[in-house]
Image (cartoon, rainbow, N blue to C red):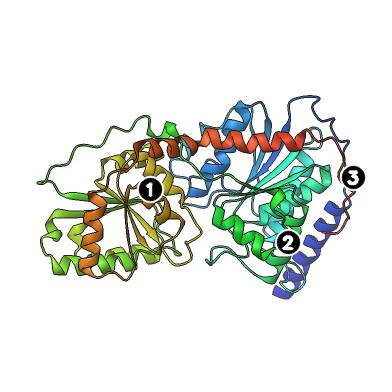
């Protein structure tokens, strides 16, 4: 029975793929005739409230303000990832059409169908929805923001169908991702190469990501790349009070705000913290570390096993403005940088800098520690630090002051989400204004 079900799902998937390949293309709109239209693919959008929501949400929010008509295709938030999602949903402009696409629910043969990040069946489901729902109002541009990266394949198929430019936005890496939360099979590599070859623009969030991608994918040329970093939202800090002044008699409070996922566990940090507490027992009474946000089972187990539980405060996911208020109330903020994150600037770093609190980067050096060092707002502590080294890094963090307030203000101004979204839509406008038809696509998917 299991083999028959697999065969049936495989046939259904291949039929869907063929039907999409040969679907009749609707007439193309005349560029500039009306307000431009964008089809956006991003798995996580409100009411999902995980960390991947904020960048595509900013594109939706500010793109609509810039006059774009936006249709956004997204998935269903898993249980536990929609807390406080209504507050994010309220930020979606009324003019934006959100299209929630459920899981395809197919389990085809892994030998006969591509095995890609997020699922090939889900990629086809998104494309099917886009073909149907956009037939009467075709897009001028198709933009995908991943991970997961099945949305890149959906966007590729949709851009080919409507014969419009494809733009890819890499929040993380795909087949080059060093972590298991993104698949990196041979099929992923092939489909990533296809997407990169077809895209008229490819956006990266860090220079290290961009340069690495250019080095490993010959199909990608620099002329089609753009660097638009992640950012912070001023509205998220509007209700947050300024941090209270510290005195030498107060308990020192450190906060890690954000998800503790399986690829960035706190084990090494907790080991150094325990060494420091054993070396200097007074820290058990004068130092508190709060972990605020969602936690993987492995991370939760590591926190629960810490030998000095009185030093830790464990708080579940909070609404965004409340999380940022907690940042501003802390004496220092903790950024965990596990091996593999050298090319990454975690989204929380932008909020950390905006909170104007000192930052302790614990783990590998890389993009994040470079920003902290250049702005003079904290210190770096290696993952194998002894208790004495950890205590020294913490002391340097707590005493850090921005070396150049003008540079800090300029960095924050340059990383506002509204400004970054304006850069993205300036790029999209340039592509939408091109009236030359692209070469006829092949019908092979």
Q: Total number of numbered labels? A: 3
| Residue 240 spot, x, y in % from top left | 32, 33
Q: What element carries label 3?
A: loop
Q: Which residue is drawn at 78% across and 51% down?
A: 157
Q: What element carries label 2?
A: helix
Residue at the disc numbered 2: 193
On screen, residue 164 above or below 199: above
CA distance separating discs 1 and 2: 37 Å
Residue at the disc numbered 3: 24
CA distance separating discs 3 and 2: 26 Å
| Residue 6 spot, x, y in % from top left | 73, 70
On screen, residue 44 above or below 187: above
Q: Which of the two discs, 3 and 2, labels the residue nearer the N terminus?
A: 3
The answer to whether residue 340 is left or right of residue 169 is left
Q: Quadrant of the C terminus?
A: bottom right
Q: Do the residues labelled 1 and 2 touch (CB within 8 Å)?
A: no
Tell me if I can see residue 428 in this picture. yes
Residue at the disc numbered 1: 317
Q: Which of the two discs, 1 and 2, labels the residue nearer the N terminus?
A: 2
Q: Residue at x 22, y 61 (%)?
A: 392
Q: Nearer the viewer, mark 3 or mark 2?
A: 2
In this view of the protein, which residue sits in the foreground, 111 or 333? 333
CA distance separating discs 3 and 1: 46 Å
Q: In which quarter of the image is the N terminus?
A: bottom right
Mark 2 crowdedness (10 Å alpha carbons): few <14, some 14-19, many ≥20: some
| Residue 7 spot, x, y in % from top left | 77, 70
Q: Which of the two discs, 3 and 1, labels the residue nearer the N terminus?
A: 3
For residue 131, which numbered disc appears in the image? Answer: none
Q: Is mark 1 on a helix, strand or loop?
A: loop
Mark 3 crowdedness (10 Å alpha carbons): few <14, some 14-19, many ≥20: few
């Amino acid at each position: 029975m299991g083999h028959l079900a697999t065969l049936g799902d495989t046939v259904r998937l291949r039929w869907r793929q063929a039907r999409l390949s040969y679907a009749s293309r609707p007439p193309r709109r005349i560029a500039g005739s009306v307000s431009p239209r964008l089809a956006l693919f991003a798995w996580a959008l409100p009411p999902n409230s995980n960390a991947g929501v904020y960048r595509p949400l900013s594109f939706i929010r500010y793109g609509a303000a810039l006059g774009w008509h936006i249709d956004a295709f997204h998935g269903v938030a898993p249980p536990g990832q929609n807390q406080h999602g209504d507050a994010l949903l309220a930020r979606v402009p009324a003019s934006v059409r959100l299209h929630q696409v459920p899981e395809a629910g197919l389990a085809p043969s892994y030998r006969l169908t591509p095995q890609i990040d997020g699922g090939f069946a889900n990629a086809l489901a998104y494309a099917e929805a886009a073909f149907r729902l956009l037939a009467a109002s075709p897009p001028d541009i198709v933009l995908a923001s991943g991970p997961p990266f099945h949305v890149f394949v959906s966007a590729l198929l949709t851009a080919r169908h409507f014969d419009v430019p494809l733009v890819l936005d890499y929040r993380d890496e795909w087949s080059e991702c060093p972590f298991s939360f993104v698949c990196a099979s041979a099929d992923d590599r092939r489909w990533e190469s296809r997407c990169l070859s077809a895209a008229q623009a490819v956006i990266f969030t860090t220079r290290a990501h961009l340069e690495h991608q250019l080095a490993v994918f010959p199909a990608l040329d620099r002329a089609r790349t753009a660097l638009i970093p992640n950012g912070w939202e001023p509205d998220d800090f509007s209700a947050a009070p300024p941090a209270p002044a510290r005195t030498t008699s107060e308990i020192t409070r450190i906060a890690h705000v954000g998800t503790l996922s399986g690829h960035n566990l706190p084990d090494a940090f907790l080991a150094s913290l325990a060494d420091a507490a054993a070396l200097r027992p007074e820290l058990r009474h004068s130092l508190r570390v709060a972990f605020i946000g969602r936690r993987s089972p492995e991370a939760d187990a590591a926190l629960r096993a810490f030998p000095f539980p009185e030093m830790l405060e464990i708080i579940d996911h909070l609404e965004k403005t409340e999380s940022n208020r907690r940042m501003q109330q802390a004496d220092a903020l903790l950024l965990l940088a596990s091996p593999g994150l050298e090319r990454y600037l975690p989204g929380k770093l932008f909020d950390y800098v905006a909170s104007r609190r000192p930052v302790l980067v614990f783990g590998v050096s890389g993009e994040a520690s470079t920003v902290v060092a250049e702005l003079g707002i904290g210190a770096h502590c290696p993952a194998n630090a002894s208790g004495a080294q950890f205590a020294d890094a913490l002391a340097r963090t707590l005493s850090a002051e921005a070396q150049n307030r003008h540079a800090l203000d300029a960095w924050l101004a340059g990383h506002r989400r509204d400004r970054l979204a304006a850069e993205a839509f300036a790029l999209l406008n340039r592509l939408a204004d091109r009236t030359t038809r692209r070469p006829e696509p092949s019908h092979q998917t």
